[in-house]
Image (cartoon, rainbow, N blue to C red):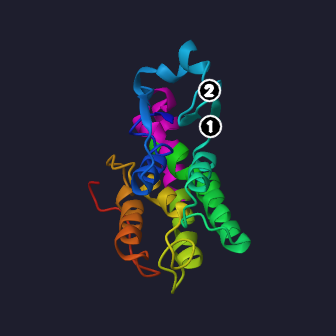
């Protein structure tokens, strides 16, 4: 199987992580997002949406990170994507939660405008406003993650079992140490979640330090 990817892509890394942990061999083909390779005709013939990842399994081609993760998990009968309908529905729910509201604001609103030239706003005030809004919205999603999804007793996002939904959290952890004001707040929460299975206690301060 071949995976069209870029190592900075937070939608590619979960697939690479899951494949490595599950012993799935993938032939990796780099698509350089920083030089605009995803907009070139050769790649548009692979995915007209101009996005990575793309999985090729023989004559079968699949896009979208979540769909690829589920496909691979089913191919190897991974317990990380349980067969029980209720447990599987919970995994699907969590993956959709991360891939819609959280990912939209944290990645597309806060991180990507800072690291991808083609997503940076031309007007500096618009750029600063976009990043500030994305950061504020991301902190709101992290509060939901802290207080509702994890809550007082869950070790992972689907309870006490590691699932493919957990790889989506690792996906979003890897991005964004870019030095903008308030970024420490976001990363303190995500770092604590990954290290300890929970976020900082409710009400803990994460106001930006002067000079950040």
Secondary structure type for disc 2: loop
Can you tell which quarter of the image residue 54 is in? top right
Task: Name the residue furthest bottom.
Answer: 153
* Few, some or many residues within 10 Å of mark 2 (<14, 14–19, 20+): some
Q: Answer left or right for 71 relative to 20.
A: right
Q: Which residue is mark 1?
A: 63
The quarter of the picture where residue 64 lies is: top right
Indicate whether residue 124 is drawn in magenta. Answer: yes
Report which residue position mark 2 lands on.
Answer: 47
Residue 26 is inside the magenta segment: no
Residue 98 found in image quarter? bottom right
Nearer-the-camera pick, 170 or 69? 69
**163 or 202, nearer to the observer:** 163
Q: Is residue 75 above or below residue 38?
A: below
Residue occupying the point 42% across, 52% down:
23
Q: CA separation, marks 2 and 1?
A: 8 Å
What residue is drawn where x is 49% and y is 70%? 162
Residue 41 horizontal/vertical position (percent): 57, 13
Q: Is residue 67 visible?
A: yes
Q: Decide which of 61, 205 is in the foreground and name it.
A: 61
Q: Which residues are magenta?
A: 112-136
Residue at position x 46%, y 46% in the image: 10
The image quadrant where one finds the C terminus is bottom left
Q: Secondary structure at mark 1?
A: strand
Q: Nearer the viewer, residue 206 or 37?
A: 37
**Relative to 142, does residue 68 appear above or below in the rendering?**
above
* 59 to the left or right of 180: right
Q: Is residue 94 left or right of residue 120?
A: right
First along the sequence among labels 2 and 1:
2
Q: Is residue 40 above or below residue 86?
A: above
Q: Position of residue 111 (x, y in %)?
A: 45, 45
Q: Position of residue 11 (x, y in %)?
A: 51, 45
């Amino acid at each position: 199987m071949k995976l069209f990817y870029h190592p900075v892509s937070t939608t590619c890394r979960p697939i690479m992580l899951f494949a490595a942990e599950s012993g799935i061999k993938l032939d990796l083909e780099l698509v350089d997002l920083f030089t605009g390779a995803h907009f070139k005709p050769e790649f548009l013939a692979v995915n007209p949406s101009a996005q990575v990842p793309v999985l090729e399994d023989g004559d079968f081609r699949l896009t979208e990170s979540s769909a690829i993760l589920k496909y691979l998990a089913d191919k190897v009968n991974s317990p990380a994507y349980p067969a029980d309908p209720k447990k599987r529905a919970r995994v699907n729910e969590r993956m959709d939660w991360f891939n819609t509201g959280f990912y939209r604001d944290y990645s597309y609103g806060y991180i990507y405008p800072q690291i991808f030239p083609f997503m940076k706003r031309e007007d500096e005030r618009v750029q600063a406003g976009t990043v500030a809004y994305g950061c504020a919205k991301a902190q709101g999603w992290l509060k939901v993650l802290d207080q509702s999804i994890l809550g007082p007793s869950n070790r992972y996002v689907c309870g006490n079992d590691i699932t493919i939904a957990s790889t989506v959290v690792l996906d979003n952890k890897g991005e964004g140490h870019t030095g903008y004001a308030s970024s420490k707040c976001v990363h303190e929460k995500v770092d604590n979640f990954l290290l300890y299975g929970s976020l900082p206690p409710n009400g803990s301060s994460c106001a930006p330090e002067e000079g950040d």
